[in-house]
Amino acid sequence: MRRILKKALATAALIAFAAGAQAKETVVWWDFLSGGDGVRMKSLIDQFNKEHADSIEIQATTLEWGVPFYTKVQTSAAVGEGPDLMTYHLSRLPLGVATGTLREITPEELKAAGFSADNYAPANWKAAQVDGKQYAIPFDIHSVVLYYNKDKLAAAGLLSQDGLPKGLDGVDNFHAALEKLKAGGSEYGVSIHSAAGDSQWRIFYSLFSQQSGKFLSDNGKFLEGDNLDKAVKATSVVAKWVADGLAPKSTDYPASIALFTSGKAAMHINGVWEVPTFTDLAKQNKLGFEWGAVQLPTFFDQPATWADSHSFAIPNRKGKEISPEKLKAVLEVVKWMNEHSLFWATAGHIPAFSPVTSSDDFKKMQPNATYSTLAKTAVFDPSSKLAGVASPVYDAAGNFLMPAINGELDPQGAMEQMRDDLDGQTE
């Protein structure tokens, strides 16, 4: 009897062990995605959960974008709470590392999960590192692009036979094109968010980087040496558009978009995230013209475009570190999301995972495939805890760059004040 009982207990233990080994892993997920991004991510999460019903379940929560999100992540990680996985802007990595909020993903862990730098644009992969250590895995590249009204550009002789703009490279050529478009009946040659500091930073940093500018020197100083002159040049270009009536003055985000969609502005500079807006309006026959989007023209010495990335990161929870089993599940989630990022591209983004961007399906996706060339020359925000989304650098852009664009400050004085303001915050 004892022998039978022992055998029964051993069998029960084996069954319990097997059940435990096959238990479903729960991945607690936080993101900051709203609007079209939020809808698309929810769809991807639902699809993942259906395909992994027996092994992994993502339990997702969406928090407020910007400072509130990063503050909550930092405070929760410090007390051992928070998610297993979260979305994170690569531009905010330096602050996350400096505050101990982010967990390194080691080369061994990346290799075991099947991640390779070869599958990502070099600048994008590097932006996911701080001091050579990996703290995130990129999901996309999102940047500013030049939207254009094909009808108006064609009438002005600025459209090539393949439907792409021509004659826009160079500061003088672009300015002349704006004048030609205005003379042809457009209220503005280009609409910009001249009342939005973050939008102006993206244009500024593109033009600044086209001059090989270095916003933050290796010694931690901002706009040091001739970089100040390059910053003044970049600022002066956009300020002249506004001063000459070729771009609108003190115009907010919605109004700037409306100028383009109404046909009052022939071109528009904005993020790739507005592609769904124009796509939907065109499908509803509410646009009234054919549109396209391309990489920003090369105004100075070399092509360069401001960029950031939505990425995936793991919080460094004090006293409640992630287990090997949970880490395996988390990295499986990230890998799956990258492999299925073609759907994410419908939000206008460029997938970070190159096997997706090199696929036939992506090459047919317009205008994404056309402007995806910018990934090769994308420039990410300076690697600093003062830089990135909702950062002191963005605040300084609102306080100094934006007034300079609108003629309220002299570009030289504005850049000097911006430099001094940021240098003062490093002390």
Image (tube, rainbow, N blue to C red):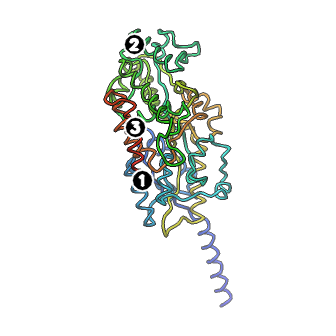
Q: Are circles 3 and 1 on residues that touch, CB within 8 Å?
A: no
Give the number of the disc on residue 416: 3
Mark 1 neighbour density, 10 Å: few (under 14) some (14–19) many (20 or more): few
Q: Relative to 288, say whether 229 is above or below.
A: below
Could you tell me the amino acid type at mark 1? Glu
Query: Seen from this angle, which residue lies furthest front?
Result: 225
Is residue 72 toward the left or the right of residue 120 in the image?
left
The residue mark sitting in front, 2 or 3, is: 3
For the N terminus, the image quarter is bottom right
Give the number of the disc on residue 427: 1
Mark 2 lies on a secondary structure that is: helix
Give the residue number, with chain letter if any, for mark 2: 182
Q: CA distance from mark 3 to mark 1?
A: 17 Å
Give the number of the disc on residue 319: none
Mark 2 neighbour density, 10 Å: few (under 14) some (14–19) many (20 or more): many
Sooner in the amino-acid sequence: mark 2 or mark 1 = 2
Occupied quadrant, residue 203: top left
Q: Position of residue 351 (x, y in %)?
A: 57, 39
Occupied quadrant, residue 409: top left
Is residue 353 toward the left or the right of residue 305 in the image?
right
